[in-house]
Image (cartoon, grey):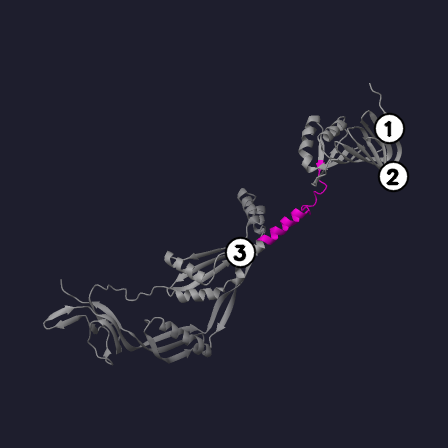
């Protein structure tokens, strides 16, 4: 678990691996109790965990509350 | 980051639907703040603020998604927020504060002039509208002052209901004796036997000297004055007082039974008699009567019998003074009872009989028109 603030890309902030904040335009592709997938700025963010829940969401920002994180994947999408 | 405004929250639940993500995306793009978004087998749940509800409804229609809205705080009727508490406090406090003041004074009187006069007299007593109730003078003092200033009133009713004061004046009864025609000149004639004690005349000439006995029908004062050979008719007016005896007899049962109100009985749901009738003959009338009986309220006054045994002490201390007062009430204002003699009181098994003699002084003159020919 990372306690220090970690900024992975211009739009993902991880305060710890229980609260993941994503800034900027994004699209919610998938949400289930175990996974959450967001698309934005040509990237895909996939989170898999024991429990994934969006604690807040508005136009510019989404905060995802995660418990027992099993997979955290950021992929650059192919530009078609 | 959008600023979160305080407001009431609403829980939303969407059953599994293919347009769920598009709907949520549309909400997000329309600046709807979404909280606690989660998804499970039963569907998607999230919370939003009530202020965004109209936007949510509009988007929901576009996407044709059924949403179930619930309020997380719907089971508590009163929202414990500052404004609610302040309003609630005002709701209790304001009526209480207003109830401390007198808001309305109304006066009920037959004469408008006296109504205005009473208002000004109340004003002098510092009984005004918009004044604190606790600083007002007492009802008895108001009554005392108003009665002292208005001799033509016999009583003042003061009724206070809440912060209203209603004053009703009761005018004194106008006592008019001798309603006889004042225009027709007349003589004064004795209407009973008595010994003349004094005259109180405004016109006419005395015929009978004082301390002389007169019979019924004797002319006491003449309304015809003689001036030489001519008669001048002036008409006699006034009163002639004489002493006379009046005998009063009474008869009372020795045991007086009277009804005394003891209580009131209220009967509700007296269905049984109507039900019995309905069971005997099942007709529409009886059914109507049965239904009516369920709503009927019967009030029954329960009266207790009270017994009172007449005693000699009661006769002397209560009954005779009462009889004396009753006799005195038949006299004119200047008349009086000079003496009282009990002739006899006879007790039998169930009755008590008695005779009382009153020595009275009162006006014995009545008017008799002077016959002036045609």
- Tell me the chain of label 1: A
Return the residue nearer the eye: B302 or A3: A3
Q: Quadrant of residue B74?
A: top right
Viewer can see residue B352? no
Q: Is B365 above or below relative to B94?
A: below
Q: Which residue is mark 3?
A: B299
Classed neighbour count for the residue bearing mark 2: other residues with Cα under 10 Å, few (<14), some (14–19), many (≥20): few
Residue found farthest to the top: A80
User: Which is nearer the N-term, disc 1 or disc 2?
Assistant: 2
Assign the N terminus of chain B to one quadrant of the image: top right
Return the residue nearer the eye: B157 or B112: B112
Q: Which mark is residue A74?
A: 1
Q: Is A33 above or below relative to B299?
A: above
Return the residue nearer the eye: B155 or A75: A75
Q: Which mark is residue A4?
A: 2
Give the distance between the C-alpha atoms of the residues marked 1 and 3, in whole angstroms. 87 Å
Assign the C terminus of chain B to one quadrant of the image: bottom left
Question: Where does the image place residue B118, in percent across and percent down from the top left?
Answer: 41, 60
Region of the chain picked out in magenta, as a range? B69-94
Q: Is residue B75 magenta?
A: yes
At x 89% / y 31%, what residue is drawn?
Answer: A71
């Amino acid at each position: 678990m990372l306690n220090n603030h970690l900024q992975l890309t211009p739009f993902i902030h991880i305060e710890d691996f229980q609260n993941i904040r994503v800034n900027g335009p994004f699209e919610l592709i998938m949400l289930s109790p175990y996974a959450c997938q967001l698309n934005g700025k040509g990237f895909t963010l996939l989170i898999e965990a024991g429990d994934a829940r969006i604690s807040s969401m508005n136009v510019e920002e989404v905060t995802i509350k995660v418990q027992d994180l099993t997979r955290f994947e950021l992929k650059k999408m192919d530009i078609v | 980051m959008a600023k979160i405004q305080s407001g009431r929250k609403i829980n939303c639940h969407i059953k599994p639907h293919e347009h769920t993500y598009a709907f949520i995306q549309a909400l997000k793009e329309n600046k709807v703040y979404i909280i606690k978004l989660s998804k499970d087998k039963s569907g998607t749940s999230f919370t939003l603020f009530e202020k965004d509800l109209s936007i949510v409804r509009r988007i929901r229609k576009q996407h044709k998604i059924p949403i179930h809205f619930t309020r997380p705080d719907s089971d508590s009727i009163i929202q414990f927020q500052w404004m609610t508490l302040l309003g609630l406090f005002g709701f209790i406090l304001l009526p209480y504060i207003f109830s401390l003041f007198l808001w309305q004074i109304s006066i009920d009187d037959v004469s408008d002039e006296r109504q205005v006069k009473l208002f000004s007299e109340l004003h002098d007593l510092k009984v005004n509208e918009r004044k604190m109730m606790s600083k007002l003078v007492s009802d008895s003092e108001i009554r005392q002052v108003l009665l002292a200033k208005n001799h033509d009133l016999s009583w003042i009713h003061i009724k206070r209901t809440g912060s209203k004061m209603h004053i009703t004046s009761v005018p004194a009864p106008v006592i008019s004796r001798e309603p006889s025609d004042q225009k027709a000149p007349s003589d004064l004639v004795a209407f009973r036997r008595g010994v003349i004690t004094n005259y109180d005349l405004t016109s006419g000439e005395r015929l009978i000297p004082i301390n002389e006995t007169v019979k019924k029908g004797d002319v006491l004062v003449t309304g015809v004055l003689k001036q030489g050979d001519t008669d001048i008719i002036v008409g006699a007016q006034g009163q002639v007082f004489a002493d006379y005896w009046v005998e009063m007899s009474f008869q009372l049962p020795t045991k007086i039974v009277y009804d005394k109100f003891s209580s009131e009985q209220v009967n509700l749901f007296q269905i049984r008699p109507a039900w019995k009738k309905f069971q005997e003959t099942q007709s529409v009338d009886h059914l109507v009567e049965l239904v009516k009986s369920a709503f009927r309220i019967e009030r029954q006054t329960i009266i207790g019998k009270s017994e009172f045994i007449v005693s000699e002490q009661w006769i002397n201390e209560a009954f005779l003074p009462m009889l004396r007062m009753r006799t005195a009430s038949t006299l004119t204002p200047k008349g009086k009872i000079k003496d009282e003699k009990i002739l006899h009181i006879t007790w039998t098994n169930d009755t008590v009989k008695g005779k009382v003699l009153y020595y009275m002084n009162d006006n014995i003159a009545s008017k008799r028109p002077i016959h002036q020919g045609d």
